[in-house]
Image (cartoon, rainbow, N blue to C red):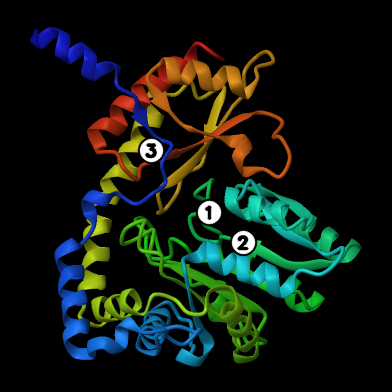
Amino acid sequence: MAHLAAMADDLRLVNFASLAADRELCPSEELQRAFRKVITMRGKTVFDYGHPAGYRPLRESIAVNLRVHGVAVTADEILVTNGSQHGFDLLLRLFARPGAAVAMEAPTYSLAIMSCRQQSIPIAAVAMRADGMDLAALEGHLRSRAIAFVYTMPNFQNPTGITTSQVHRERLLGLCEAHGVPLVEDGFEEELKYFGHAVLPIKSMDNKGVVIYLGTFSKVVFPGLRVGWIAAPPDCIERLVAISRVCWLSGNVLTQAAVSRFCDSGAFEEHVRRVHRTYRPRMRALLDGLDDRMPKERVTWSRPQGGYALFMQVHPRGKMSEEVAMERIRAAGVLVSPGSLYFPSPPKQVCFRLSIANLSPEKIAEGCRRLGKALKGMV
């Protein structure tokens, strides 16, 4: 019986597909204390409608945290959102105009693509290189067509995990300044740096009010905590507040107040340290496992310095569809996220995203073993 149980356990899928933060790491006790404290201190005021820009003490807390990353903003330059996806949607509503496209990396965040499609906003796809967005291609778009804004993830890009250099960030900012186009910087995993030296956000270099910064607590604290923010010049925030007031009246004041307390008490910083202690060995296990198990002559992958994900490209000797590749990988006992989700148009080769978000180092090592065996049979 024990032997049969071990076989059943071995046949269970290793899920590299999910990017949601590990719920087991949720600081539930600290958050409970924060909720109790704000109810005790603020009483029924946290049960009422709030300001459409968000709970002011939270906006002040976010501004303080951004200064740690070199971004000098005030509470009046912060709009609290229902997660970064909500923030992206608000920016589409603000900047979209007939015929203007959103320039974004390819591959990129799948829901950014879907949001543009749902609102019939064209996408100007810019290929991702090993060092980030292809800036020569971006400049071609900026010169040849109307661009509503440029959307980028310079840290631990989803899905590639790539972090861009200081030089790349300066050049990207310079292009947007020269063409008078807003640069939307998505810092959804800003806190999740595991290896190497940190590179400051592009927003930290923004002297002309070009950069609009998106942030969120969801990827660090827990997925259901729908609290994010936009950091932008005051005139932009004012226009976004007007849109936000129509779209959702105000956010959840109680939750925003509790998150503010959670940050101000020092619990957020301690939680980030705990997350680093957990995810650093997970990312190391993934990189080591791929180095040991992959057929390197026909498979390539990114090497993230942080975050949850990396991107893998397969170069089969013959033609192979993504569907067939996914079926073979699943048959080996592994789930991955198909690469086609992250491109505005179908990619030319088989690729997929791997995430460490919900896997132990031991499970990651086993997943790499299974994946290596599957890919060796494909290439």
Residue type at mark 3 is Leu
Taking the image as shown, residue 363 lies to the left or right of residue 189, namely left
SS for callout 1: loop
Marked residue nearer the N-terminal end (2 or 1): 2
Choose mark 1 or mark 3, whichever is in front.
Answer: 1
Question: For the view shown, which residue lies furthest in the left direction?
Answer: 2
How many numbered discs, if any?
Answer: 3
Measured in 3D between alpha carbons, the distance from the residue under mark 1 to the one under mark 3, in whole angstroms, is: 17 Å
The residue carrying pointer 2 sits among few (fewer than 14), some (14 to 19) or many (20 or more) residues within 10 Å by Cα, namely: many
Q: Which residue is drawn at 57% across and 81% down?
A: 245
Camera-side residue of 224 and 200: 224
Q: Residue at x 69, y 15 (%)?
A: 319
Please tell me the numbered disc located at residue 141: none
Q: Which residue is drawn at 76% across and 74% down?
A: 181
Marked residue nearer the N-terminal end (1 or 3): 1
Residue 317 in the image: state x and y as whole percent.
65, 14
The residue carrying pointer 3 sits among few (fewer than 14), some (14 to 19) or many (20 or more) residues within 10 Å by Cα, namely: some
Please tell me the numbered disc located at residue 157: 1
Residue type at mark 2 is Thr
The image quarter containing residue 139 is: bottom right
The image quarter containing residue 142 is: bottom right
Question: For the view shown, which residue lies furthest in the right direction?
Answer: 144
Taking the image as shown, residue 180 lies to the left or right of residue 155, namely right
Task: Say whether residue 109 is visible.
Answer: no
Q: Which residue is drawn at 42% across and 79% down?
A: 66
Measured in 3D between alpha carbons, the distance from the residue under mark 2 to the one under mark 3, in whole angstroms, is: 24 Å
Marks 2 and 1 close (CB-CB < 8 Å): yes
Marks 1 and 3 close (CB-CB < 8 Å): no
Please tell me the numbered disc located at residue 152: 2
